[in-house]
Amino acid sequence: MKSFNEITQLVTSELEQISWSKEPRGLYEPIGYVLSLGGKRIRPALALMACNLYSEDVQPAIQPALGLEIFHNFTLLHDDIMDKADVRRGQQTVHKKWDDNTAILSGDVMQIASYQFIAKTPIKHLKPVLDLFSQTAAEICEGQQYDVDFEQRDVVKGEEYLEMIRLKTAVLLGCALKTGAWIGGAGEEDAQNLYDFGINIGLAFQLKDDLLDVYGDEATFGKKIGGDILCNKKTYLLIHALELATGNDAEELQKWLKINDPLQENDKIKSVTSLYNKLGVKAICEDKMQFFYSKAIANLEKVSVLENNKQELRNLAEKLMSRQD
């Protein structure tokens, strides 16, 4: 069994071999740029780790794994435009370094490229993998639309938010694991358990992201702390704060939600964070994160391979929960 570090080194090496030095440069240069910024490479790593559970040879899963990583980065290009984000992985976002039109068009090419890599799946598994990937791609768009819709709504329920992040974030992790499992030769029950592991770890992962956006360290997180607060993003924290706040707390929270003044950004972050602390929503978010993490581990335990062979996936799940970036 390969370690997570060995798998990510393999992914990075394969990504570096893809040449984006094509014409027109204005279209392809941003793709090379965003892929060079690094990232955790979790999705391709999960695909190869799942394959490795059933086969020593992960080579047949490499091209579709790269397709998943390219697709993930495509979604970030478009997300950053929609979120008006200036920084990604500690560097300028593509739409800031170039412009919105470039980020849209380069993202479109990345989506096409992701399908080209997925299409290199071994023919025996090509149709189910392609069908799952297409379903997942559509679900991610659905999740993003819910995310946009929530910005226009005063009330969003916690369950609605969890369904949104399942679609926007978790399904791609599930897709990666199921794809790798199929290519490695897993049976359908194991492939589904690994998919469910990905869904639950993805939900926990996004809740951790919500926490880090407020309580993380900007130097290690790679983007501005409090960004969700500044744009009134309906995170699990804000949803519960709106439900729990009464009296003066409710008035103060509503006051800050109406303020969109660049000169008051630091005050807004500080004041809303203080309200979160007072209302105890950090603990609520942490408890739900732990709930999904426990479900994920239960899914993994059902996978019928040697316990030792599942240790790398367990370790990765733990690492994702304790991460600071």
Image (cartoon, rainbow, N blue to C red):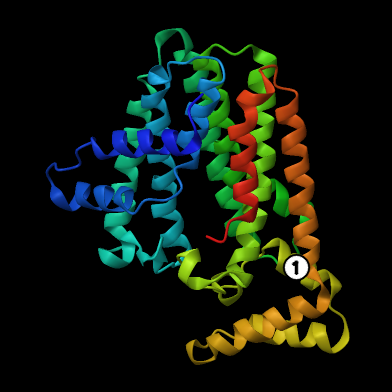
Image coordinates for residue 152, horizontal then vertical, percent: 63, 66
Residue 36 in sight here: yes
Q: Residue at x 72, y 83 (%)?
A: 274
Residue in view at x 65 percent, y 46 percent:
318
Where does label 1 land, which residue? 282
- At numbered mark 1, what does the secondary structure look like: helix, strand or loop? helix
- Residue beneath the point at 56% across and 77% down: 230
Q: Position of residue 319 (x, y in %)?
A: 60, 48
Q: Is residue 53 left or right of residue 255?
A: left
Relative to 322, does residue 314 appear above or below in the rendering? above
Q: Residue furthest right?
A: 247
Looking at this rendering, what residue extends furthest in the left direction? 23
- Answer whether residue 224 is visible to the viewer in this image: no
Q: Determine whether 264 is above or below 172 in the image.
A: below
Can you name the residue that lies furthest to the top here? 124
Q: Residue furthest bottom?
A: 263
Residue at 44% x, 48% y: name it. 75
Q: Position of residue 166 (x, y in %)?
A: 65, 44
